Amino acid sequence: MSLPRWIWLAAALLAAAAQPQNTAMKACTQSEFRQFDFWIGDWEVSDQTGKLAGHNTITAEQGGCVIIERWTGASGTGGMSMNYYEPRSGHWKQNWVSPNLILEMSGGMQGNSLIMEGPMQYIGKDQTTLLRGTWTPLPDGRVRQHFVESKDEGKTWEEWFDGYYKKTG
């Protein structure tokens, strides 16, 4: 006695649906996907004078294919970002959203730093600038996150944030 054709078709579709997922999980183990792993952890963030700026939790999710940032500033502000390596372009991407800002950056490794740049929209102000972020692992285990902003399409840059991440726990 043979099985109905629809059962064979359903089994074939289920097997095919599972295959791309396994391939994606394997693809995210490549070295390019690990370039930003130095940022993963629970962090206390201070400015260059040592004043507490906030806390940040950075996690690898979806089999290491995405790095999620959850920021809580010392003043109670917050925001989050999704960071991922995009093989087609060979770039890292960051999408940040908070009550005041929307940011879309892309870039890559330069030396031992990850550098991304892109448009930053100030919500409610009808203003868009450029933001460049540099994440650098330091020899003592901290990470420096340095942002500069341009209000003239990249002709000049001003410091926007200079933070030092120290792991908690």
Image (cartoon, rainbow, N blue to C red):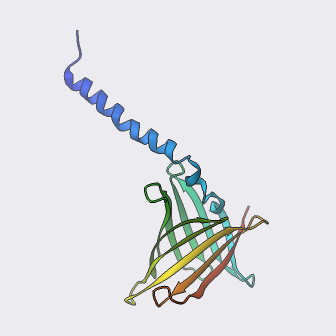
Residue 61, image x, y percentages: 53, 53
Question: Is 103 left, or right, of 141 in this rendering?
Answer: left
Residue 148, image x, y percentages: 57, 83
Residue 165 position (above or below residue 25) = below
Observer-nearest of 84 and 73: 84
The residue at the point 56 percent across, 47 percent down is 30
Instruction: Please identify the quadrant where the N terminus is shown.
Output: top left
Observer-nearest of 119 and 72: 119
Q: Is residue 99 visible?
A: no
Residue 126, image x, y percentages: 37, 89
Residue occupying the far top of the picture? 1
Residue occupying the far right of the picture? 140
Residue occupying the far left of the picture? 5
Residue 18 position (above or below residue 52) = above
Q: Is residue 24 visible?
A: yes
Question: Is 120 left, or right, of 168 in this rendering?
Answer: left
Residue 145, image x, y percentages: 64, 74
Residue 117 position (above or below residue 35) = below
Q: Quadrant of residue 140?
A: bottom right
The residue at the point 39 percent across, 36 percent down is 18
Instruction: Please identify the quadrant where the C terminus is shown.
Output: bottom right
The residue at the point 66 percent across, 63 percent down is 42
Question: Is 112 left, or right, of 97 in this rendering?
Answer: right
